[in-house]
Amino acid sequence: MNAWDCLAGQLIIEEAGGRVERQSADQMIAEGGRVVAGSAGIFDELVRIADTVFED
């Protein structure tokens, strides 16, 4: 997936009322990175799971 596809998808999710984890668009384009997105009701749990799985 290209970064611009991911960023466009994130915009669609936000416009539909979902939530997207904030990241630097410049960094995502240059280096990639994790993407966490979901409905408002499950977003915090998704971030918690992602933090556990994607430890630095």
Image: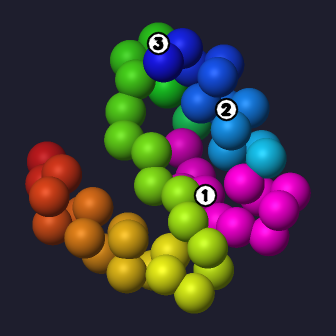
- Sequence-first tag of 3 and 1: 1
Name which residue type carries label 3: Ala
Mark whose residue sits in front, 3 or 2 = 2
Is 8 included in the stretch rendered in magenta? no
| Secondary structure state at the residue bearing disc 2 | helix
Query: Which residue lies at the image location 50% right of the left edge and 75% below the top edge?
Result: 43
Query: Which residue lies at the image location 49% right of the left edge and 81% below the top edge?
Result: 42
**Residue 33's x, y, as percent?**
37, 33
Name which residue type carries label 2: Leu
Q: State the separation of the CA atoms marked 3 and 2.
A: 13 Å
| Secondary structure state at the residue bearing disc 3 | helix
Left or right: residue 27 versus residue 54 is right
Q: State the separation of the CA atoms marked 2 and 1.
A: 10 Å
What residue does disc 1 label? 20
Query: Which residue lies at the image location 38% right of the left edge and 69% below the top edge?
Result: 47
Name which residue type carries label 1: Val
The 10 Å Cα crowd at callout 1, few under 14, some 14 to 19, many 20 or more, is: some
Left or right: residue 31 versus residue 55 is right
- Sequence-first tag of 2 and 1: 2
Is 21 included in the stretch rendered in magenta? yes
Which disc number belongs to residue 30? 3
Q: How is the image coloured?
A: rainbow
Q: State the separation of the CA atoms marked 3 and 1.
A: 19 Å
The 10 Å Cα crowd at callout 3, few under 14, some 14 to 19, many 20 or more, is: few
- Sequence-first tag of 3 and 2: 2
Residue closer to the observer: 23 or 43: 43
Tags 3 and 2 touching, CB below 8 Å: no
What residue does disc 2 label? 7
Q: Which residues are magenta?
A: 13-23
Left or right: residue 17 versus residue 22 is right
